[in-house]
Image: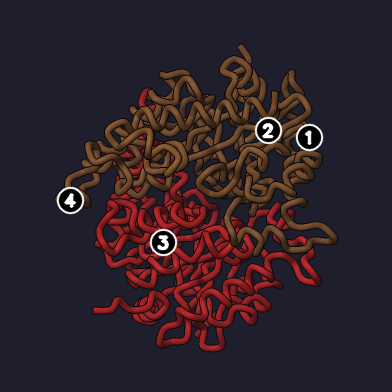
Chain colours: A brown, B red
Amino acid sequence: MEPGNFADALIEAVRRKQSQVVVGLDPRLERLPAELRPRVDDRADPAAAADAIMAFNRAVVDAVADHAVAVKPQIAFYEQWGCEGMRAYSDSLSYARGRGLLTIGDVKRSDIASTAEAYAAAHLGSADASAAPDFVADAVTVNPYLGSDGVQPFLAAAAARGRGVFMLVKTSNPSSAELQDLDCGGMPLYERVAGLVAQWGEAWRGENGYSLLGAVVGATYPGELARLRALMSHAPFLVPGFGAQGGGVEDVLGAFDERGEGAIVNSSRGIIFAWQRELYASSYGEERWRDAVRAAAADMQERIWRATH
Amino acid sequence: MEPGNFADALIEAVRRKQSQVVVGLDPRLERLPAELRPRVDDRADPAAAADAIMAFNRAVVDAVADHAVAVKPQIAFYEQWGCEGMRAYSDSLSYARGRGLLTIGDVKRSDIASTAEAYAAAHLGSADASAAPDFVADAVTVNPYLGSDGVQPFLAAAAARGRGVFMLVKTSNPSSAELQDLDCGGMPLYERVAGLVAQWGEAWRGENGYSLLGAVVGATYPGELARLRALMSHAPFLVPGFGAQGGGVEDVLGAFDERGEGAIVNSSRGIIFAWQRELYASSYGEERWRDAVRAAAADMQERIWRATH
């Protein structure tokens, strides 16, 4: 049986859950609730760190499972804890999948040819099982700097396995302009990259018109979102930077098509550490941190859904 | 005690060993010698794969230890084997370090702010031990697409720990031109990136004048090497693409300064699978694969040293 197209699976999940919310699983030990934070003596113990991260992620996934369409663990926060951390990354993906969530590995990998194939096998799976399944997610993020050699192996693996790829186009950090906004023949570099996303993704469109190749476009640049939507009309957008990084609902609307589809929006700290935000701190103390996480996910779900439907 | 500057340590090691050779530890199961290759039944068993990779890497490190200044494991080939593979990555770094080799983690990571800090802690170590040491190398490769937010955390970590960073500038793959050669105001994008390397690295120069921030510049574009050398006069160059990817000694000479210093050259397949090359196959069969690996490293060492000194 041919696997389906990732964009179709994503759209179907969004419709079913009425949610365009992606929850970033970016655990920082020092911000975990006290009940889970490793004791000071254990702060440098990778096994204790990984255990704390897993306990936290399980609780977060349970809290957001009804309100989010996907989770997006940022692999750096797991690599930091070495082999123990990578086990927690793997277990977090499995746990989220078991709760009916799509998984997006925020790995931003980039390399060429056979090396990109190895990364693709690691993070999207391999057809002949010549790779471990530990780090396989439903979709991954990739970096465009090396050109098509670095991206095509991911597209081939994604197509073979019904998975997806989100390529960095315009990121949400302050210094993204240093390269991404450079004038390349009358348009900024990121619009050139947008053109490559449109071109490379064209061959991989599903029944809903969207491609398995999507784009990462930061919500901190709302003016650019609508223009990028037009340049990449068939690319699902993954929009980070909502909440903690400053973007609000009005800032992400440009990412959606006229049916209110074609984009998912990520919040990490704004949801997973919601009880530390002024907005939720008064209603929920740290003792009710799980409820604050759930409330933040539900609020974000409702606000974006209402604005787009 | 302040840790020293990585560029000084690198130059000192090159002088001592009279070698500018970096051996890429990019294990591909299907190319391992039959004595180490997992049995067909075990081809999809990550533990068997990781064991085979480690046995191979130990033998390669032993064979090249006298002829190379550093090894550069490409982490994709370890991620492919999941948690077991990551343990092999960690063990390979330790083993090479124990044999007196510098280690360069070819991870090409890219992310922003606190995420880049987490990657830097993972791969260059953390001052307060709030990270596992498993994946820490003497230097790492990074991707420039996100701008200074994505690179400064690596530089800070490297400076604090006496380690180094090599930023992708011009890669050796055919499609590197798609982005890297785009005309950005009268110069290709990669020259803009070279300017950033020069600028960001200026603050981190050691006694020999070189910075802990280096550049990855492919040997498949020899004409550009000398120009990039001039644009980044204080950046150590890591030159991949020697041997298997087509570059020869004459192609890498432009990477060196007038003293024959300031660059190291990587070969992966050309050395670690040397007995499969026509050049060595007749003198060494597979039964003498270790000797072929040693001979290939020694030949490369001598050819580059003679051409630069």
Residue at x-position 76% and y-position 44%: A228
Of residues B20 and B306, the one nearer the viewer is: B20
> Residue lying furthest right in this view?
A186
> Residue lying furthest front in this view?
A282
Dot 1 falls on which chain? A
- In the picture, the quarter occupied by the N terminus of chain A is top right
Residue at x-position 41% and y-position 61%: B104
Q: Do the residues labelled 2 and 1 touch (CB within 8 Å)?
A: no
Instruction: Look at discs 3 and 1 and give the one toward the viewer.
Output: 1
Of residues B21 and A205, the one nearer the viewer is: A205
Work out whether A2 lies above or below B178.
above
Of residues B308 and B193, the one nearer the viewer is: B193
Q: Distance between the residues labelled 3 and 1?
A: 40 Å
In the rendered image, residues at marks 3 and 4 fall on the same chain: no
Q: Distance between the residues labelled 3 and 2?
A: 36 Å
Q: Distance between the residues labelled 3 and 4?
A: 32 Å
Label 4 secondary element: helix
Quick one: label 4 or label 1, which is nearer the N terminus? Answer: 4
Q: How far apart are marks 4 and 1 (CA)?
A: 50 Å
Q: Name the residue under label 2.
A: A236
Instruction: Look at discs 3 and 2 and give the one toward the viewer.
Output: 2
Q: Mark 4 points at which residue?
A: A40
Q: Distance between the residues labelled 2 and 1?
A: 8 Å
- In the picture, the quarter occupied by the C terminus of chain A is top right
Work out whether B119 lies above or below B48.
below
Report x, y in % for residue B37: 37, 36
Label 2 secondary element: loop
Work out whether A183 lies above or below B302.
above
